[in-house]
Image (cartoon, helix red, strand yellow):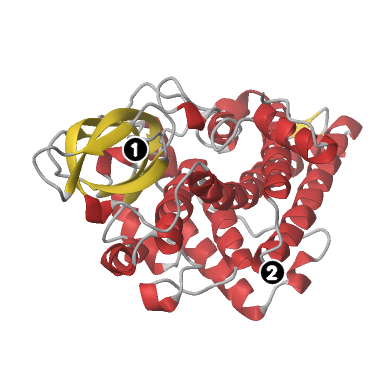
Amino acid sequence: MRTDNYQGHDYFLMDELLTEEQKLIRDAARAWVKREVSPIIEEAAETQTFPRHLLAGLGEIGAFGPYIPHEYGGAGLDQISYGIIMQELERCDSGLRSTASVQSSLVMYPIWKYASEEQKRAYLPKLATGEMIGCFGLTEPDHGSDPGAMVSNFVQDPDSPDHVILNGAKMWISNAPFADIAVVWAKDETGRIYGLVVERGMEGFSTPKMTGKWSLRASDTGELIFDNVRVPKSHIMPGRSGLGAPLSCLDSARYGIAWGAIGAALDCYDTALNYSKERLQFGKPIGAFQLQQKKLAEMITEITKAQLLTHRLGVLRDQDRASSAQISMAKRNNVDMALTIARDARQMLGAMGIVGEYSIMRHMMNLESVVTYEGTHDIHLLITGMDVTGLSAFK
């Protein structure tokens, strides 16, 4: 069982930009992760099992919808506090952060923004505590980067004026195997996209678990299958329709990922730095060699740049001024940065870099999923390209 001695790295004194409340939130999340998750995360990844007993604890530290207002059960925190929590979770494991990120940004966020008052009060308080867990159904087996081409659809139930019939399938859905509800995006009879809250137990709704993953192994991933599911019309979210609705949720999720990826990078850097001081070769610590110092110097430089970028993005989010393109840039940059650091850190540890005694290989495998989901590396590149040129490469 690995002891978690992580203390943090703040090369540009970023703590001076945080409020006392934000630092307390970070310290509480870090202490919980060290106590409850770090001792068991390697076994969870090896056995490809999400430790569901952690859900209540995630609720207790405010990891579920921290920015949701108090009246709906949330903590009413700012966007930087949300990012800090995501960073602390992913410092341990990307799958852990994925569970919280999906719950917060892809389930609670759309319900908060687009659901009816009755729907908000029915779901948000239970989601905030972890009593209820949700998932988000947008990606389909044949439609990932082009969600507007989805085929999942619902039509009027011929036997009931108060119901619709939902058919289709969603794939690569985090939390699906154990989720109580799914926020599902599907087209109506006119082709307009709406969000529906589908509850476990509705006839024709199933959530088979996907196995065989070499990445995000400590996170449960599944499918959502809708076979003539009768959904009450009262479960259709009335606040917004069209593709912009789910994409706004992805903005929130990508913002959390931008913070989370820094956490994974920090853990890899911390591991490599400590190892470089302890591992002796040719009569001295390997950290005394120029090539190893080059790697470490580049790691902390890139981490610091990402920290500055993401903190500024958080300020803009709190001011409701952050654009989707800015969020895309941060997500793409920070995940790419974290992957590069994970690979360099693995090299520094040599053969020890691939064993479970150290977290680096697990981070590296996890980040191969993070660089793909919530918009691939290349799609985010094109979003930035479109933003700076005014020309779309998608059509």
Residue 211 x %, y %: 33, 24
- Using a 10 Å C-alpha cutoff, classify the residue at mark 2 as few (fewer than 14 neighbours), some (14 to 19) or many (20 or more): few
Residue 349 x %, y %: 68, 31
Tags 1 and 2 in contact by the CB under 8 Å rule?
A: no
- Mark carried by residue 319: 2
- Using a 10 Å C-alpha cutoff, classify the residue at mark 1 as few (fewer than 14 neighbours), some (14 to 19) or many (20 or more): some
Residue at 29 percent of width and 53 percent of height: 53
Residue at 76 percent of width and 48 percent of height: 303
Q: Residue 154 occupies which quadrant of the picture?
A: top left
Label 1 or label 2, whichever lies nearer to me, is 1
Residue at 37 percent of width and 56 percent of height: 238
Asked if residue 209 can be seen in this view, the reply is: no
Relative to 228, residue 333 above or below: below
Q: Which residue is mark 1?
A: 188
Relative to 250, residue 186 above or below: above
Front residue of this view, candidates 26 and 170: 170
> In which quadrant will I find the N terminus?
top left
Compute the Cα span from label 1 to label 2.
Answer: 34 Å
Residue type at mark 1? Asp
> In which quadrant will I find the C terminus?
top right
Which badge, 1 or 2, comes first in the chain's sequence?
1
Residue 394 x %, y %: 67, 26
Q: Is residue 77 left or right of residue 222?
A: right
Relative to 147, residue 276 above or below: below
Residue type at mark 2? Gln
Front residue of this view, candidates 21 and 267: 21
Q: Is residue 158 left or right of residue 138?
A: left
Front residue of this view, candidates 374 and 267: 374
Q: Is residue 349 left or right of residue 201?
A: right
Q: Residue 335 occupies which quadrant of the picture?
A: top right
